[in-house]
Image: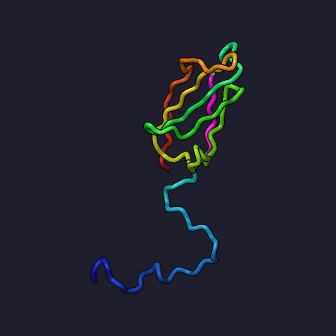
């Protein structure tokens, strides 16, 4: 018997599932989850600009009036579908005062999303 055998296997004996039924996730994988980011408020700030990077790529950005933001499990950034998958991310927060974003970020941090 060779690895490319055409003989039936136990997989071929699996019961049929109705069309449209989602495929089961492989063991050890979990659905992406939303993440809430929060930081100390900056006195005088009317809002904040938040950016999340994976490697050199900007994957999420949002303006908020409160010192927190939730990154959804799935979203679109510049027309691209994104998901908060396992890996290392960098996130930054700039305060907005008088309608202008500060030159220096008040948060420069990393986030490690573990593989499940």
Question: Which residue lies most toward the top here?
Answer: 43
Tally of marks: 0
Q: How is the image coloured?
A: rainbow
Residue at image location 65% in from the left, 37% down from the top: 70
Q: Nearer the viewer, residue 32 or 51?
A: 51
Residue at image location 51% in from the left, 35% down from the top: 111
Q: Position of residue 55 (x, y in %)?
A: 43, 38
When the figure is inspected, residue 77 is found, relative to residue 16, above or below; the finding is above
> What residue span does the magenta drawing correspond to?
34-39
* 84 left or right of 19 in image: left
Q: Position of residue 40 (x, y in %)?
A: 64, 20
Give the quarter of the figure containing the N terminus: bottom left
Question: Which residue lies most toward the bottom here?
Answer: 7
Task: Please identify the quarter of the rendering in which residue 23 is found.
Answer: bottom right
Q: Nearer the viewer, residue 57 or 109?
A: 57
When the figure is inspected, residue 62 is found, relative to residue 9, above or below; the finding is above
Q: Position of residue 90 (x, y in %)?
A: 49, 33
Q: Label the magenta part by its dominant secondary structure.
A: strand
Q: Position of residue 15 (x, y in %)?
A: 56, 81
When the figure is inspected, residue 92 is found, relative to residue 71, above or below; the finding is above
Asked if residue 64 is among those painted magenta in the image, a careful observer would answer no
Residue at image location 55% in from the left, 53% down from the top: 30
Task: Please identify the quarter of the rendering in which residue 20 is found.
Answer: bottom right
Q: Nearer the viewer, residue 106 or 98?
A: 98
Residue at image location 71% in from the left, 20% down from the top: 46
Asked if residue 35 is among those painted magenta in the image, a careful observer would answer yes
């Amino acid at each position: 018997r060779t690895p490319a055998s055409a003989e039936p296997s136990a997989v071929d004996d699996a019961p049929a599932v109705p069309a449209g039924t989602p495929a089961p996730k492989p063991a050890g994988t979990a659905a992406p989850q939303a993440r809430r980011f929060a930081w100390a408020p900056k006195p005088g700030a009317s809002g904040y600009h938040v950016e999340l990077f994976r490697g050199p790529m900007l994957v999420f950005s949002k303006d908020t009036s409160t010192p927190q933001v939730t990154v959804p499990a799935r979203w679109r950034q510049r027309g691209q579908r994104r998901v908060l998958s396992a890996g290392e991310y960098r996130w930054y927060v700039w305060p907005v005062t008088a309608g202008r974003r500060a030159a220096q970020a008040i948060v420069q941090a990393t986030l490690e999303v573990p593989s499940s």
